[in-house]
Every structure is written in structure tokens, then in C-alpha cells.
Image: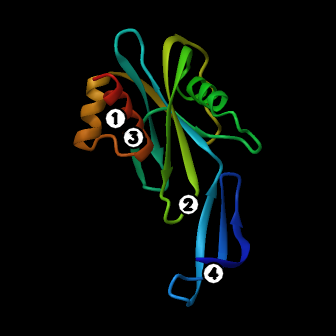
Amino acid sequence: WKTLSSRIAYENPWIRVREDRVVRPDGGPGLYGVVEIRPSVGVVALNDREEIVLVGQWRYSVDRYLWEIPRGGSNKGETDMLAVAKRELAEEAGVLANSWQQLGAAEVCVGVSDDVQSFFLATGLSPTQVQHDAEEDITAAWHPFEEAVAMVMDGRITEVCSVAAILKVAWLRK
């Protein structure tokens, strides 16, 4: 792949779509579209009763209600993903944590996106004020962690970052 030129085809507060004129591996010309997304986070928050907080919300892009771990994106210029994780956990689930463990990251939809989501395990939890963004209508609910793993395995949790982070924690707890 060789990039000949790039242009921004579309931009809003959450994504930017870049269109590149390219030379493909076969030598032919082509166009490649890339959805650029600021780095984001996902948090597996476990209380002392071995319960995980899940957040439910309607996801416009897939036109259905989903259960996920608390997740969210960084603001322009933010590079401290732990700070983003702390903010998102408090905003979406009304939870603070005393202990944080980084679990790695996942690249999402790499064929069309540069989206990277960092995962964290949060423990030593306490409540705080929920502060949803204007476009969010979120319900937080506590579930036994093993039930969340079952929800991943039977398809009740399908959002890829939630699946990956929950299974990472399940593997660590073996």
C-alpha cells in the first residue's frame, strides 16, 4: 500500500472520516476510507461481592439496547487513558475506584478504523454522583461476575470491547 494523498471527507465531534488515494499491493489505483476515532477506554469494575457493574443503553448505530462495561472516548488532546477511565466509570456508573489495573488494549474494526480501546480493572469501589452526557440515557446494574461471563458466552453481551475486557478478567481470575 502506498498513500498518494489524503483528505478529510467528513468530521463530527466523535469521528473523522479520511479518504486516501492509494496504490494497492497489486499496483492498481484505489481509494481507502479510514474512520478516525480518538482513543477510548473500557472498565471492568468489580465490587467486594464479586459483582460487575454493567451499563445498558440504546445504541443508535445498531438500533438496539445493549449491555456493556462502562466505556467512553477521550477528549481532544487527552493522552492519559487511566484518567479517561476514571472519568467514564464515574460518569456512566456512578462509581469511584481505589485500585486500578491496566489490562491492555484492543484495536477495533482495523479494516476501516484506527480505533484503539484501553481496558482497565477497577476495584475498591465506592459510589459517586452519576453525570451522563446529554446524549446518554444509561442504566447501571450490578451482576455477579460469572453471570457477565455467561452473558458474553450466550450472546447477551456482544459489544466487542466489553467481550474482550470481561474475558481478559475471567482469564486473570483463573
Front-most of 129 and 81?
81
What's the distance in space between the residues labelled 3 and 1, CA to CA? 5 Å
Residue at left 22%, top 41%?
Answer: 154
In the picture of the structure, the residue carrying the numbered disc 4 is 22
What's the distance in space between the residues labelled 1 and 2, CA to CA? 23 Å
Of marks 3 and 2, which one's residue comes earlier in the chain? 2
Q: Are marks 3 and 1 in contact (CB under 8 Å)?
A: yes
In the picture of the structure, the residue carrying the numbered disc 3 is 164
Residue 106 position, x and y percent, is 48, 46
Residue type for callout 2: Ser
What's the distance in space between the residues labelled 3 and 4, CA to CA? 32 Å
In the picture of the structure, the residue carrying the numbered disc 2 is 113
Residue at left 49%, top 65%?
Answer: 111
Residue type for callout 1: Leu
Of marks 3 and 4, which one's residue comes earlier in the chain? 4
In the picture of the structure, the residue carrying the numbered disc 1 is 167
**Left or right placement of residue 56 versus residue 152 in this view:** right
Q: Quadrant of the N terminus?
A: bottom right
Q: Which coloring applies here?
A: rainbow
Q: Is residue 136 visible?
A: no
What's the distance in space between the residues labelled 3 and 2, CA to CA? 18 Å
Residue type for callout 3: Ala
Residue at left 50%, top 87%?
Answer: 26
